[in-house]
């Protein structure tokens, strides 16, 4: 039985990998993903799109004391902006960016006019776009929820280096990421999709978007000590998903990091 489940999952993953091609093409895959989404929020198709009280409100308590309050907050990889709309209540100047134009269109649509949020399309792997963003906004603090792990391992250091451009001299980065064992965790839940996983997880796989998870032991490879100062970290947290087909939220093992880039050239 277990073998059949594994074969079913593997054949699905391989089928969609061949169908959509190069897993490095995050811009194409994530646009594909967001184009496939018709319903967001609880009861919707987006796995992580939970109420802020079950998501960014928990994160805010961790990162707010470490960030310079005079800087704007950037919700990097904001998707449809649900967490951005909560964070704007705590940060008067907030920007939501995402690589997917459709995600940004959804974020704008779902945001009431009274909430002053600047949404932009921005690809974290494009150094020129990231530099232009810094030229426009100056140093920012960054909130990044489950974005690094959707990048292939060899792209992660470039993304980190590009984030350092946005942070500049005064910004602080908060990232929360799924653990490497996230897929194993989802496999323990009742599945109702062709891959045997909960539908909201299958919705990601079928569009070519991939998740490689993040192992905190990998932190020095992505954020080397020569370049980054670790302000706080924990590998003992969860990311709470929307209620899944079995009726309950998923509590996915996760880690968070609070980081600041060292001035270029400094070692300690
Ligand atoms: C798992 S979703 C998380 C969305 C949002 N942070 C949240 O918690 O609701 C990952 C998001 O990262 C975006 N993304 C993927 N690669 C990106 C890149 N290179 N630059 C900017 N955003 C990216 C995707 O379009 C997607 O919206």
Image (tube, rainbow, N blue to C red):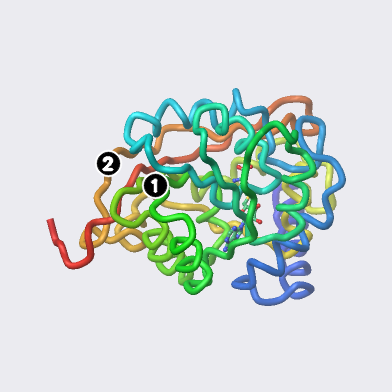
Image x and y of residue 256, in percent: 42, 40
User: Disc 2 on helix, strand or loop?
Assistant: strand
* Crowd class of label 2 (few under 14; some 14 to 19; many from 20; radius 10 Å): some
Quadrant for the C terminus, please: bottom left
Depth order, front residue of 33/262:
262
Depth order, front residue of 176/244:
176
Residue 199, quarter of the rendered image: top right
Is mark 1 in CB contact (under 8 Å) with mark 2? Answer: no
The outermost residue toward the right is 38
Choose the circle earlier in sequence order: 1 or 2. Answer: 1
Image x and y of residue 113, in percent: 74, 36
Image x and y of residue 80, in percent: 71, 45
The outermost residue toward the left is 268
* Crowd class of label 1 (few under 14; some 14 to 19; many from 20; radius 10 Å): many
Residue 173's disc number: 1
Residue 56 located left or right of residue 164? right
Q: Is mark 1 within 8 Å of ligand 1?
A: no
Image x and y of residue 56, in percent: 55, 32
Residue 134 located left or right of residue 261? right
Residue at 46 percent across and 52 percent down: it is 214
Residue at 37 percent across and 34 percent down: it is 69
Q: Rounded to the nearest whole Å, what is the CA distance between mark 1 and mark 2?
A: 10 Å
Residue at 67 percent across and 48 percent down: it is 79
Residue 144's disc number: none
Residue annotated with mark 2: 231
Residue at 36 percent across and 57 percent down: it is 218
């Amino acid at each position: 039985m277990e073998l059949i489940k594994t074969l079913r999952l593997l054949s699905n993953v391989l089928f969609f990998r061949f169908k959509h091609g190069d897993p490095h093409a995050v811009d194409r895959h994530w646009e594909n993903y967001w184009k496939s989404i018709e319903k967001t929020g609880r009861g919707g198709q987006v796995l992580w799109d939970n109420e802020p009280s079950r998501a960014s409100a928990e994160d805010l308590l961790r990162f707010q004391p470490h960030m310079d309050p005079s800087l704007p907050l950037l919700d990097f990889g904001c998707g449809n902006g649900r967490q951005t709309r909560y964070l704007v209540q705590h940060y008067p100047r907030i920007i939501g960016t995402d690589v997917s134009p459709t995600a940004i269109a959804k974020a704008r649509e779902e945001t009431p006019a009274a909430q002053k949020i600047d949404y932009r399309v921005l690809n974290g792997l494009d150094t020129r776009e990231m530099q232009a963003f810094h030229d426009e906004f100056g140093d920012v603090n960054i909130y990044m929820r489950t974005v690094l792990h959707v990048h292939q391992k060899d792209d992660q250091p470039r993304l980190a280096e590009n984030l350092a451009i946005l942070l500049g001299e005064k910004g602080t980065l908060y990232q929360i990421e799924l653990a490497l064992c996230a897929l194993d965790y989802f496999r323990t839940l009742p599945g109702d999709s062709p891959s045997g996983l909960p539908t909201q997880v299958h919705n990601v796989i079928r569009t070519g978007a991939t998740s490689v998870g993040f192992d905190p032991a990998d932190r020095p490879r992505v954020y080397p000590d020569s370049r980054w100062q670790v302000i706080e970290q924990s590998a003992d947290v969860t990311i709470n998903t929307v209620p899944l087909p079995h009726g309950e939220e998923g509590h996915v093992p996760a880690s968070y990091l609070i980081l600041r880039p060292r001035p270029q050239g400094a070692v300690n």
